[in-house]
Amino acid sequence: MDSMNGTDNVPETATLKIKAFFESAPPLKDAAEIETKLKEFVDRNSSSSENGKINRVVCVTSGGTTVPLEKRCVRYIDNFSSGHRGAASTEYFLKAGYSVIFLYRRGTCQPFCRSLPDDPLLECFTSTDHSSIQVDPSHAEVVKRAISENRSAVNGGFLLKLPFTTIFEYLQILRLIAVSLRSLGPSAMFYLAAAVSDFYVPWESMTVHKIQSGSGPLDMRLAQVPKMLYVLRNEWAPVAFCISFKLETDTDILLGKADMALKKYKMHMVVANELSTRKEEVIVVTEQEQITVCRDKTQAGADVEDPLTTLVVDRHSAYIKHSDA
Amino acid sequence: MDSMNGTDNVPETATLKIKAFFESAPPLKDAAEIETKLKEFVDRNSSSSENGKINRVVCVTSGGTTVPLEKRCVRYIDNFSSGHRGAASTEYFLKAGYSVIFLYRRGTCQPFCRSLPDDPLLECFTSTDHSSIQVDPSHAEVVKRAISENRSAVNGGFLLKLPFTTIFEYLQILRLIAVSLRSLGPSAMFYLAAAVSDFYVPWESMTVHKIQSGSGPLDMRLAQVPKMLYVLRNEWAPVAFCISFKLETDTDILLGKADMALKKYKMHMVVANELSTRKEEVIVVTEQEQITVCRDKTQAGADVEDPLTTLVVDRHSAYIKHSDA
């Protein structure tokens, strides 16, 4: 859902707008802690490489960003996203040998937890008495798998999870990640599956207090979020392999918008998906081709993220090889 | 956050607006299932009463409602609410012998789970190998308590949980609950802690597809949600004991608005709370008095919901006694 089109045809205008966005944004509270975690993660993945080859690292963004409507925030605009795509893709990237920075919206789907009910603690466990609890037999396998695979990825240093809520937090953390991954060159990848707000209320023009009802309808004017994909590719991480996502509800305009994003922001791949069929198929748009990727309907429980990440890893390999040459 | 003020001074206008709201709302998908659950719950609580006295039942609403901005919804306006107040109050009402209908926003805080981390399954458990998992000793007590107390309340028939997401779902389910609790007379209570949207986009005027960015700023006009507290008190559940909540960020207008809600919607109590101090104290406004309720600061972990629910139960007892007389 990243804003892909727009009227910013002059790069300088885009850069100025982005500068203004960051200058007016409320500062990230735990920036120092995030930077420390990122440094450790990148260092570990640079030094632990075998045969002098750098480990591959992918930043997967997942879930929707919010736009506060008041500074002392009671109301906000949110983007619908369960985070299922990002969580599933993270699992497949880990399986393919990548280390993953999972930049996710608080409360959305976590890797290895896709098959669990909404409230797994209360739904999957029973207690015979107050001193002992046990997993329901029907959920035992998925619960054990979720806990053990998550622990092994996090404790092994292959999975770094960073949460966000607002558009301001998301973009500031994404910038920190991009800058910290620069040292990995083409081995770094961005897989931008998060549903990022297109419109926002600039912090300096935001009302302090809760907007009052009672005086008739509410009129709101929202500004466009500046196009961050442009600076990500051109300034923050110019050598990384970049994949963005384009979600629409109207198939008639979907491919045109995906193609525009590819050209305008120089993405390496754009994954076009339509809201109602997004779990069945996506169309991957590259400079040379359009590839329809479908889930394997002959296999129960097969998902579209499995073949999608296989394709992405394959193209990333070619990109690294090409960069080395 | 229920809309409390407004221009609807003529009851007929309010009733007409509410009728129009429900007629244009997308119909509740699982209405029949909810009605069945409610009937069973109310029947059980009518028949299981001791000494011919009717069991007390409270409907606690919790978490924020959303307002979709598109029919094929990608974006929505949300109300900030963790659901902590509703979850905590539910625990105390159960302890006080009430049966509770917990009408909550999907994904928000659940009763008995307040002390758990955000993602309890992944945070509180470890696995030694793939075949066995265990609770971290540091979390063992709260995890066991959460699971056993939730199970005992749900399986014992004292706690019925009903989830909602949109304002349309919330108000339709609230109406079903109110109608089903009528048979309990003054023994029924409404404790409306949910953060209910004040503004919405009427379903019939809502755009079908995702709103396009790229053509400059977005202008939106939102209509006021009709004042449901009025019909709740006057039509849906005229004999029930009703408590609403008023959240503001500006203390200067808080008590005035709470008082207005009390008078205009004939609430029995209005709990006024200010965003930044809401976990420390609230002011309970009744026709006769204003009572400041604070958490016991001398006790570690004490919360404001403990004395608040004690006061509410006390006043509800007096109300029932008065109704019997």
Image (tube, coloured by chain):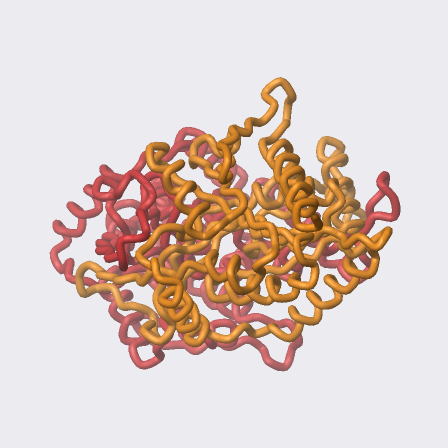
Chain colours: A red, B orange
Q: Is residue A244 visible?
A: no
Question: Can the viewer see residue A46?
Answer: yes
Residues B266 and A192: in front is: B266
Q: Going 62% across and 35% down the picture, which residue do you hit?
A: B311
| Image coords of residue B70 (percent x, y) | 36, 69
Which corner quadrant of the image does residue B34 belong to? bottom right
**Residue at coordinates 17% horizontally, 51% vertically from top-left?**
A14
Name which quarter of the figure residue B140 lies in: top right
Whether residue B157 sits left or right of residue B228 in the image: it is right
Residue at horizontal 83%, vertical 57%?
Answer: B48
Whether B174 is drawn above or below A150: the answer is below
Residue A137 located left or right of residue A107 = right
As drawn, which residue projects farthest toward the front? B325
Q: Report the residue that reaches farthest toward the top.
A: B298
- Number of residue marks: 0
Residue A162, percent from left and from top: 48, 43
In this view of the protein, which residue sits in the foreground, B120 or B45? B45
Depth check: B169 or A93 in front? B169
Give the camera-side residue of B52 and A190: B52
Q: Residue at x 77, y 64 (%)?
A: B43
> Looking at the picture, how far across and down is residue B185, in whole percent?
67, 58
Residue B78 lies, with reference to residue A310, above or below; the image says: above
Residue A195 % position (x, y): 40, 58
